[in-house]
Image (cartoon, rainbow, N blue to C red):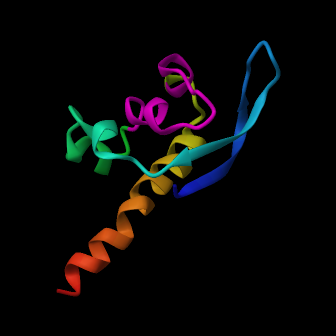
């Protein structure tokens, strides 16, 4: 399972302790079911992030992320697809 850990510029406040990093795993087909590709390309990842977060990110927490963190996390989500795009382009 491919994962990436991102250091958050603004930690997520939780009762059990602040979450300063967020680990994402590569999306599986079930994770992206019902999502529009254009939304992912626009980095509207608030629906996808809870599905692929190893840390159990909630939808509410995803909507409360700092703008800089949304950009970083969105880039990582797109980054999971880059090897697939390169492979398809080489054919």
Question: Which percent across, then down, holds residue 80?
Answer: 42, 60
- Front-most of residues 9 and 35: 35
- Above-or-below relation of 72 to 44: below
Q: Residue furthest right?
A: 17
- Above-or-below relation of 13 to 31: above
Say left or right for 86 vs 79: left
- Above-or-below relation of 57 to 52: above
Question: Which percent across, then down, holds residue 75?
Answer: 47, 56
Q: How many marks?
A: 0
Q: Residue furthest front?
A: 1
Question: Which percent across, then down, holds residue 15?
Answer: 78, 12
Question: Which percent across, then down, holds residue 68?
Answer: 59, 44
Q: Residue furthest top?
A: 15
- Front-most of residues 24 and 9: 24
- Above-or-below relation of 49 to 5: above
Q: Residue at 30%, 78% (x, y): give it.
A: 86
For the record, the magenta segment spans 45-62
């Amino acid at each position: 399972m491919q994962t990436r850990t991102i250091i958050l510029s603004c930690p997520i406040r939780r009762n059990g302790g602040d979450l300063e990093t967020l680990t994402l795993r590569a999306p599986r087909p079930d994770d992206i079911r019902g999502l529009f590709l254009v939304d992912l390309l626009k980095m509207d990842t608030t629906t996808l992030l809870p599905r692929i977060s190893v840390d159990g990110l909630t939808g509410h927490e995803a909507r409360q992320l700092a703008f800089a963190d949304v950009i970083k996390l969105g880039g990582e989500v797109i980054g999971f697809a880059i090897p697939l795009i390169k492979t398809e382009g080489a054919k």
